[in-house]
Amino acid sequence: MSAGTASDAALEALFVPFATGELALPPEGGVLVLRAREGVALREHIRPGWLLQQSFAPAANALARHRYDVVADPALVGARLRAIGAAETFHTILILPTRQREESRALFAQAMQLVAPTGVVVASVPNAEGAKTAESDLALLAGGVGQLSKHKCRVFWTRPGAQPDPALLADWLALDAPLPIADGRFISRRGLFAWDRIDTASALLASVLPADLRGRVADLGAGFGYLACEVIDRCAAVTSVDLFEAEGRAIEPARANIAAAVARSGRDIATRIEWHDVTLGIDGRYDAIVSNPPFHQGRADQPDLGRAFIATAARALTPGGRFWMVANRHLAYEATLGACFGQVRTVVERDGFKVIEAKDPR
C-alpha cells in the first residue's frame, strides 16, 4: 500500500502512544501484532522476538520478505510460542482491526486471551473506517480504554491488568468460528468476501457454467469454495479440483465445503486447497479454470488484480483449456483477455456483471 493511505496512517498512529511515552514497548520480544502489515512504521519499531499475524497472503508475503516471524491464524499463536519455548502471553498486543465489526470483535477477544495480566492491548483505526465504534467495542470488553487521535485515526488501549467480561469474551471468540449459511449448504466465516450469502456475481457464473467441463479444474480466488462446489455438482467429468485463495481464514470453510461436495457427488475427485496469492502464478496445468477475481483492496477499484488473475489463468491452462470468469461490467478486462487468449466471448451480461469464456491460451 502506498504512503499516505488511510491504512498507512493507521499503522503510523498505532505507535504514537509509545513515542509520546504514554505506553512502553518491552526491550525484546513480548509483542504480538494482529493483522500486521509491512510499512515504514513497523520497520522503525519492530524488535527481535516480535510475532506478527496476518491471514491475507499478499500482506503476509510482504512481511515474510523482511524475515519477520509471521503466522496466518491467531489460533496458531499458542502453538508457535510453545514450539520456540516462549511464554504463552504477551506484554503488548497491537491490532489493526478490519472493517468487519464482528471480525474485529473476535480479534479483540483473541487479544484479551493472549495478553499478560499486566499487559496492554492497543488498536488503531482510521476515523473514516469506524474508529469510534471499534473503540467502544474494546472499552466494553475490557472495562474502559485510554485514547488519543493522530493521523486522522483513533488509537486506543486497555489498562494494565484489565479483565475482560467473561460472557462477552466467550461470545466474541465464537464470532471467528465457521458457521453455516445458505440454509446450511455452505460453511463460511465472518469477514470473508460475501461471507453470509452467495455472491450475486458468482451465482451468475455458476448458472451458465457448461456441464461439459472435464479433467483438472482450478478455482482462482475461491473464497469459501462456492464456485468449486458448483463445478463438482454440475460437471460429471471433472476428476480434480484445486482451490487457490489469498485469505487464510477462508481455508477451513472451503475445505469443509469441498469435502461435502465430493461426498454428494459420489465420485472419486481429488482436491487441493492452497493459501496463495494468485497474482504470483500457480503451479499445475488445468483443463478448465473458473474465477470471480477480486477487483479491489480497500475502497478503490484495482482492475490490475483481475488482469493478473487472467494472465495466471492463461499460463496455467492446457492448450485446449477454457477459462470462465465473472466481473463487474464496467471493468475493462477485454484487452488483457485478447492478449492472453485466442478466443474470447461474453456469455451473458446481467445485474451489472458479465460472464466471459476465453479459450486457446496464448
Image: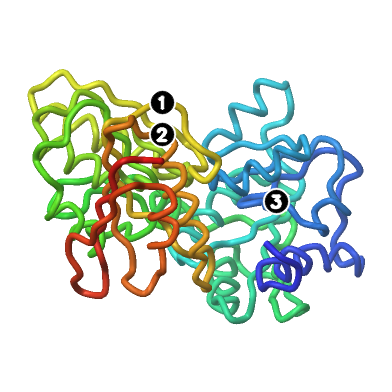
x, y percent for residue 71 = 61, 36
Query: Do the numbered discs 2 and 1 sit on residues whose CB atoms are within 8 Å?
Result: yes
Among the two numbered marks 2 and 3 on one chain, the one whose residue lies closer to the N terminus: 3
Find the distance from the CA under tag 3 to the CA under tag 1: 39 Å
For residue 134, side relative to residue 235 (left or right): right
Residue for badge 1: 284
* Residue located 48% across and 45% down the image: 246
Among the two numbered marks 3 and 1 on one chain, the one whose residue lies closer to the N terminus: 3
Question: Under tag 2, what secondary structure?
Answer: helix
x, y percent for residue 140 = 54, 69
Check disc 3: other Cα within 10 Å, few if <14, some if 14-19, many if 20+. many
Q: Amino acid at mark 2?
A: Ala
x, y percent for residue 125 = 64, 70
Quarter the N terminus occupies: bottom right
Residue for badge 3: 93
Check disc 2: other Cα within 10 Å, few if <14, some if 14-19, many if 20+. many
Residue 96 seen in the current view:
yes
Find the distance from the CA under tag 2 to the CA under tag 3: 41 Å
Q: Amino acid at mark 1?
A: Gly
Among the two numbered marks 2 and 1 on one chain, the one whose residue lies closer to the N terminus: 1
Residue for badge 2: 316
Question: Under tag 1, what secondary structure?
Answer: loop
In this rendering, is residue 52 above or below 334? Answer: above
**Which is nearer the eye, 317 or 103?**
317
Q: Amino acid at mark 3?
A: Ile
- The mark closer to the camera, 2 or 3, is 2
Question: Under tag 3, what secondary structure?
Answer: strand
Residue 192 seen in the current view:
no
* Residue located 84% across and 51% down the image: 43
x, y percent for residue 65 = 73, 38
Check disc 1: other Cα within 10 Å, few if <14, some if 14-19, many if 20+. few
